[in-house]
Image (tube, helix red, strand yellow):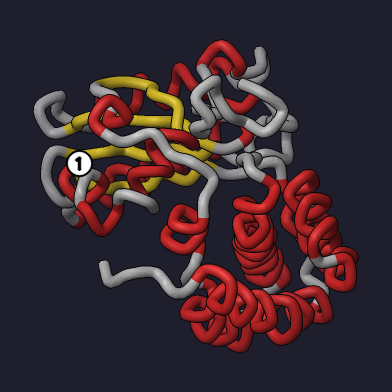
Amino acid sequence: MDEHGLDGAGTISREGALDRVGAEFAPVVEATRARLVAAFDAARVHGAYLYGSIPRGTAVPGRSDLDVLVVLRGEPTDTDRARVRSIESALDEAFPQIDGAGILLSSAASLLSDGERYDGGFFVACLCTPLLGEDLAERLPRYRPDSVLARETNGNLGSLLPRWRERHAAATTDAERRSLVRGVARRVVRTGFTLVMPRWGGWTSDLTRSADLFARYYPDRGERMRAAAEAALAPTADGDVLGMLLDDLGPWLAEEYAAVHGVPGPR
């Protein structure tokens, strides 16, 4: 992998690996694997993956969360969702080194579909680290940091803003506001990066670096994007931060993104 996150063929390298998991998080990963195996029938699970800072080796004890994707052979059911909620709670309670556990559910058919090729498929092939079962990356294409990938993987920010504003209006606690800030800021920074990704010619999931790269091309918005990266890494309940994200940087970014890359195709 070069400094732009690409392999020798110019395609995006997979960013994580189990051997990058820090010693503090190794017990969390092993417990996650064991709980998934115990909760799901082997015939039901196609595979499971880690993603985020833990498999990238950049996780900070007490501040980073555990991110997991479970891929099923059929569509997720309410029973499946109840199982992962139970696992999330058990892991969060057992391991103080993580700031929460989040487990996504999807089906193999969905991730391999044409509509998900440059979104869910890219996510699995490049951003997820196999934990157990089969690896869908073997059935997915190699991805380049081009405008097609930018449009299809992060081109829907405009459709998310109204939902986030509703959550902001309904939030009654600082914990709810911090959670919203964290999610919104992460998405805004990642969208800011993928806006400029084809011009830079590479891939990174590092939020601070993403904001800095964005600022190279949009210096007049650079400080606000750096503030968004800070909020993503250390969430605050400050209403001014959410206001900046939802009413200033976010709407501008959605409009600029559509102008530069177009809107994603139907799913």
The percent position of residue 2, horizontal first and vertical second, equals: 66, 23
In what quadrant of the picture does the C terminus appear?
Answer: bottom left
The percent position of residue 124, horizontal first and vertical second, equals: 38, 38
For badge 1, the amino acid type reads: Ala
Relative to 182, say whether 89 is above or below: above
- Name the residue rendered at 47%, 63% in the picture: 151
**Label 1 crowding class (10 Å Cα cut-off): few <14, some 14-19, many 20+?**
some
- Name the residue rendered at 61%, 27% in the picture: 56
Task: Answer whether residue 253 is visible to the viewer in this image.
Answer: yes
Is 132 situated left or right of 154 in this image?
A: left
- Nearest the camera: 233 or 26? 233
- Name the residue rendered at 53%, 73% in the picture: 157
- Nearest the camera: 161 or 264? 264
Relative to 119, say whether 218 is above or below: below
| Quadrant in the rendering for residue 32 | top left
The percent position of residue 76, horizontal first and vertical second, equals: 19, 51
In what quadrant of the picture does the N terminus appear?
Answer: top right
For label 1, the residue is 108
Is 182 situated left or right of 69 in this image?
A: right
- Name the residue rendered at 46%, 34% in the picture: 126
Task: Answer whether residue 87 is visible to the viewer in this image.
Answer: no
Relative to 163, say whether 40 is above or below: above
Numbered label tally: 1
| Quadrant in the rendering for residue 236 | bottom right
- Nearest the camera: 191 or 12? 12
The percent position of residue 199, horizontal first and vertical second, equals: 67, 53
| Quadrant in the rendering for residue 173 | bottom right
Is 201 situated left or right of 9 in this image?
A: right
Secondary-structure class at tag 1: helix
Relative to 213, say whether 261 is above or below: below
